[in-house]
Image: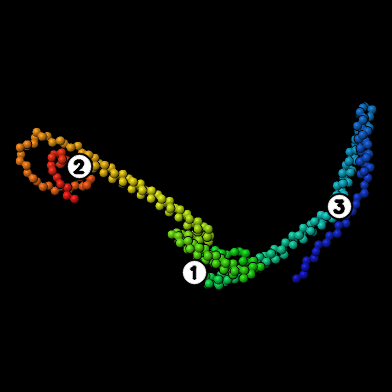
Amino acid sequence: MGNLVPVEVKKNIGTIEDNLDVVEASIRQKLAEYAQVVITQDCIQDGKELLADIRKEKKSLDDERKAIKKAWMKPYEAFEVRAKKIIDLYDEPVRLIHSQLEAYEEDRKAAKRNNIKKIYEFVVKENAELADWLPLEKIYDTKWENATCKDKTIREAMEMAFSQIKISISTIQSMQSAWEEDALNVLKDTGSLPLAIEKINSLTKQAERIEEVKKAQEEASKAELEAKRAEDKAVVEEPQELIEPETDILFPFAAEKIVVLKVTVGENNLNLVKDFFESINIEYEVIE
């Protein structure tokens, strides 16, 4: 396949000979002269003639400028038309070759992706228990598709990913946390050991807060129950007002008779019963 012919353009730049320097000097001299002259009736005709002459010379120079430019631009304009046509022609092989290169590159990448899949299938056989943890799309690196990326590099990267996930799982399990399953789920979803450990710490703190609240509620309930019991005990032990027997309604001449009564009373109320018996002159005997 031959190379393109390089472009060669020879530019023969001409020169223009003129007396513009002399013309400029004469104009400035005339300007200086008339700067000091006041137009009067005597010189008005001379002024008009000079003005017409100046305008004529100005038009002559401008016309010459345009003519020279037109003459000089003709070869350039002809060259420009031909050059633009060739420039557009370059785009046709560019489009053709570019599309072929793109098609070739896509075919190459497709073949490389298929090879990457085979490498993964080889690696995952040795880590079958972790296939669900690290599917190919989860560890895929588009740099593997580069033509310069070797199969060995791809395989080592995959093996490293499986090795790291094994270590992470082992680390979580070694913590023997009640939230191990939750942490493993985070690890499986994100592949991040720090996030998995953060999950354990978060759930642990949450459980501790719940336990603190529960303990505080239990202590409050216990204190409330003890206060109730103390209140009930105070009511039972409160001395009861004894009614003094009215001696005038007793039977002072009734014959004494010994009667044995069995009274069961709590220890806390024993003294209360004793006081009552003594107040009505009843003899008693405490049997332990």
Disc 3 target residue: 72
Q: Element at badge 1?
A: helix
Mark yes or no: residue 86 visible. Answer: yes
What crowding class fits label 1: few (fewer than 14 Cα within 10 Å), some (14-19), or many (20 or more)? Answer: few
Q: How far apart are marks 1 and 2 (CA)?
A: 80 Å
Disc 1 target residue: 129
Disc 2 target residue: 272
Residue 154: give x, y in percent of width and height: 60, 68
Q: Marks 3 and 2: which is nearer the front?
A: 2
Q: Is residue 185 above or below residue 51?
A: below
Residue 199: give x, y in percent of width and height: 48, 56
Going from N to C along the chain, the mark reached first, 1 or 2, is 1
| Amino acid type at image mark 2 | Leu
Residue in view at x 49 percent, y 62 percent: 172
Furthest residue in direction top, as rendered: 41
| Amino acid type at image mark 3 | Trp
13 to the left or right of 160: right
220 to the left or right of 260: right
What crowding class fits label 2: few (fewer than 14 Cα within 10 Å), some (14-19), or many (20 or more)? Answer: some
Going from N to C along the chain, the mark reached first, 3 or 1, is 3
Q: Distance between the residues labelled 3 and 2?
A: 142 Å
| Amino acid type at image mark 1 | Glu
